[in-house]
Image (cartoon, rainbow, N blue to C red):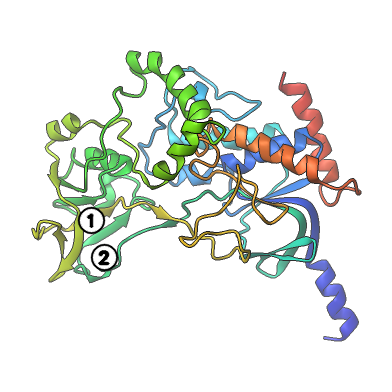
Amino acid sequence: MPGHQRALYLRLMLEQVKTLVVGGGQAGLATGYYLAKFGQSFLILDANQRTGDSWRKRWDSLQLFTPAHLSSLPGLNLPGSRSRCPTKDEMADYLEAYAAKFDLPIRRGLSVDSVSKTNDHFMISVGDHHFKAENVVLATGGYQAPYVPNFSAQLDPGITQLHSSNYRRPSQLADGDVLVVGAANSGADIALEISATHRTWLSGRHPGSEPTRPGSRADRLLTPPFWFFLSRVASVTTPIGRRMRPQMIKATLPLGRVKPKDLETAGVVRLPRTISARHGRPVMEDGRVVEVPNVVWCTGYRSTFDWVHLDVFDQEGRPVHDRGATGVPGLYFIGLFFLSSLASSLVGGVGRDAEYIARHITRSTTRRPLLGRTQAAAASVRRISSTST
């Protein structure tokens, strides 16, 4: 390709934006809401084909633990009863409606390959396309990659194995017993559901339970002060929150909906942790070998920020930040667990972080002509101003 044609090609494949938000879930949408409200030009990239798909892809019976009035993003309440716990499909549709209501500029089906910085700008690669941005907000959350232990590959190939990210309903499983590995919220919920049609074993340490059930009368009474604690007290802005944060980041949260008695009544058999495989069968911590035709891995997710080529991570690969702002000017994280408080990774708690980050960007941005999506942002500002009072 001649030099002038190559230069033209590269210009066509390079798009300039003021602020690029990577991730179109609740964290990215809330950030977009405030960026638009503060008059900033921005673009949101969503790896999914449809807003809300990250919720639609979860198992069919999934419900939130928090009531609707504490599960809304800024500017738009979830429809329906305030006290109900929304389903995952209701949440997905709500996020789609949210993006449409505020006319947020989103490009879907785009997965970012790399983020780096050259001089005063970030370079973001999406296949053959590249973005040049002054600010980047990483709103992909802290747990993107499903984790399954390496010894799962040693299990008999005849065993049906599903990670909770791929589990939808019990009909996906083969006939016979099911071993659910991981006894936190996902594992307990899925084990209880599967027990209606399969003999079920639940492997893992019991993490404890919250004192009330979501939606109960006691829960409705205790939730407001508990939410205040999660969002205001257990925060990096308070001494107690700063002391809690290092421990909470490594902790397993207690069960929110399923109680030990529920599992016992349903006939779910408790087992120790699953630690290895022997002769194609899963082995428990006490040496017991379990013969099952199905294993559901509720073993969580891991952070995968290897595509971010910037020195903003600690030795364990966790982002180093102050309420989402990193040591690299213009680079931000949002949607991480305990970003600023225990409510940071919850739908109803991400708004405070989004506003903080959007204000930070607004204060630090230079007063040069806005790039990229100026008209879309201006339209969003007008829409937000007329609808959020």
Q: Nearer the viewer, residue 362 or 213?
A: 362
Q: Is residue 112 above or below residue 222?
A: below
Residue 275 place in picture, x, y as percent: 20, 60
Q: Quadrant of residue 37?
A: top right
Q: Quadrant of residue 119?
A: bottom right
> Which amino acid is tagged 1?
Val
**With 68 as the anchor, is 157 left or right in this view?**
left
For mark 2, give the secondary structure: helix
Q: Residue at x 52, y 33 (%)?
A: 235
Q: Nearer the viewer, residue 184 or 381?
A: 184
For mark 1, give the secondary structure: strand
Q: Earlier in the sequence, mark 2 or mark 1?
A: 2
Q: Is residue 6 above or below residue 63?
A: below
* Residue labelled with disc 1: 295
Q: Residue at x 50, y 24 (%)?
A: 70
Q: Quadrant of the N terminus?
A: bottom right
Q: Are marks 2 and 1 in contact (CB under 8 Å)?
A: yes
Is residue 199 visible from the viewing direction of this image?
Answer: no
Residue 389 place in picture, x, y as percent: 72, 18
> Which amino acid is tagged 2?
Ser
